[in-house]
Amino acid sequence: MLHPPAAPDDASDALFGLDALSPTAPDPASGAGPLFRDSAAARRLLPVRQIHAEPAAAASPRGRQVIGRFPDARLIEVDSHWRIPGLHGNEGNVERWVRVKGETLVLGEKKTLTTRPNGRSADWIAPGPSNGCALACAYCYVPRRKGYANPITVFTNIDRIIAHLGRHIARQGPKPEPNQCDPEAWVYDIGENGDCAVDALISDNTADLVHAFGQWPTAKASFATKYVNPDLLALDPRGRTRIRFSLMPADDSRLLDVRTSPIADRIAAAGDFLDAGYEVHFNFSPVVVRPGWETAWSELLQHLDDVLPERVKRQAAAEVIMLTHNRELHEVNLGWHPRAEDVLWQPGLQQAKRSQNGALNVRYRNRVKAEAVDTLRGLVAARTPWLRIRYAF
Ligand code: SF4
């Protein structure tokens, strides 16, 4: 069994190069068949026309891989992936919000590699392989730091990210006792600021992380997704990657989860992902309180009970996350998707809380939230009694 490298975390050199991380994504020449990411459906989601790139990121092996995948895209040099004039923080992009997400990519290097404690969904939040997303969920908090349009930034120094993680995992040693994150492994969320299944349409960053965690016996990767990318089935996670399919009633998803895979497809994929060696959990997230929400969730849970194979049920667990929202995002959404705000912005049910950076966040009032969590727990107990709720928040 391979153990993670144990060099000090402040070493800036990578412990192994990208070549050493293979096998990564399946190679069509290997006989595994064509990759989904080369299909017309994937190209429709990501018809990339311009790539903004830091020079070092463009010159890196991962950067060259991404640029090579989109040979018709215009390459634009930028000083920093954080400050791209005309792309980030530009209110004019609100009308083009969805187009920008599909037609634009950014290549950058992740400069600060920090793993933060979490304790809810995961033990640790890892430095992710990307920032931004090609999907366009109306409640998404990921764009909060880059302004309105936030297409995917691919971090090309994935070797350094993996080396950092290896050292962090080595320092922890074995997990001393079970907790709700996992009974035996330290769980690292690798997808805090994006969707790793979508990232896998662009580069091998997700594949490299899945492969690396497959070799670390004391740790487990975890990411939530709203996209079914069948290319991930060809990887070899060895039970060390937890994929969390995010679910909500299909009517809510059609309104709020713009560009994502249909809810029924996410549920139908669970058995395949388990058979491919993933652990499969579910995120009930976000739970949106609106007229009829209890009935809609009851039907969703009944559907889970009806269609999921027993082997999925035996290992499944779920997180429940009530909607939080934010005044800035509310105002942005009014510019491109006002119907979503009819259900997301409910001042009569929500209370405001000023965050440390001055943003005005809203969440359901304490009593509304407590009652909704109780209701959902009751529905789970009645419809899917096999489903352990890891936490409700
Ligand atoms: S899939 Fe996740 S990261 Fe992407 S837009 Fe939706 S909530 Fe945001």
Image (cartoon, helix red, strand yellow):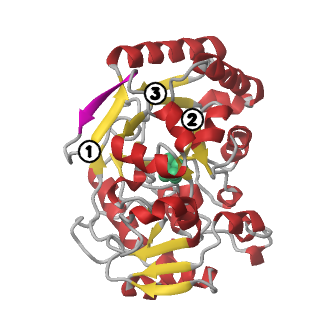
Instruction: Specify whether residue 222 is in view.
Output: no
| Residue 148 pos. (x, y %) | 41, 59
Quadrant containing the C terminus in the rendered view? top left
Q: Pointer 1 and pointer 2: residues touching (CB < 8 Å)?
A: no
What kind of residue is marked 3? Arg
Q: What residue do we see at 65% from left, 15% from top? A: 383
Q: What residue do we see at 40% from left, 74% from top? A: 86
Q: Earlier in the sequence, mark 3 or mark 1?
A: 1
The answer as to whether callout 1 falls within 8 Å of ligand 1 is: no
Residue on which disc 1 sits: 359
Residue on which disc 2 sits: 282
Above or below, 266 against 292 in this view is below
| Residue 34 pos. (x, y %) | 78, 70
Per the rendering, the mark at residue 351 is: none
Question: Is residue 34 rendered to the left or right of residue 220?
Answer: right
- Disc 3/disc 1 C-alpha distance (Å): 29 Å
Residue on which disc 3 sits: 390
Q: Which residues are magenta?
A: 349-354
What kind of residue is marked 2? Phe
What kind of residue is marked 1? Ala
The answer as to whether callout 3 falls within 8 Å of ligand 1 is: no
| Residue 107 pos. (x, y %) | 44, 76
Instruction: Characterize the local packing of mark 3: few (<14), some (14-19) or many (20 or more) Cα atoms within 10 angstroms.
Output: some
Above or below, 323 against 205 in this view is above
| Residue 268 pos. (x, y %) | 74, 40
Instruction: Characterize the local packing of mark 2: few (<14), some (14-19) or many (20 or more) Cα atoms within 10 angstroms.
Output: many
Compare residues 237 and 4 and report the one nearer the observer.
237
Q: Magenta stretch: residue 331 in it?
A: no
Q: Earlier in the sequence, mark 1 or mark 2?
A: 2
- Disc 2/disc 3 C-alpha distance (Å): 10 Å
- Disc 1/disc 2 C-alpha distance (Å): 29 Å
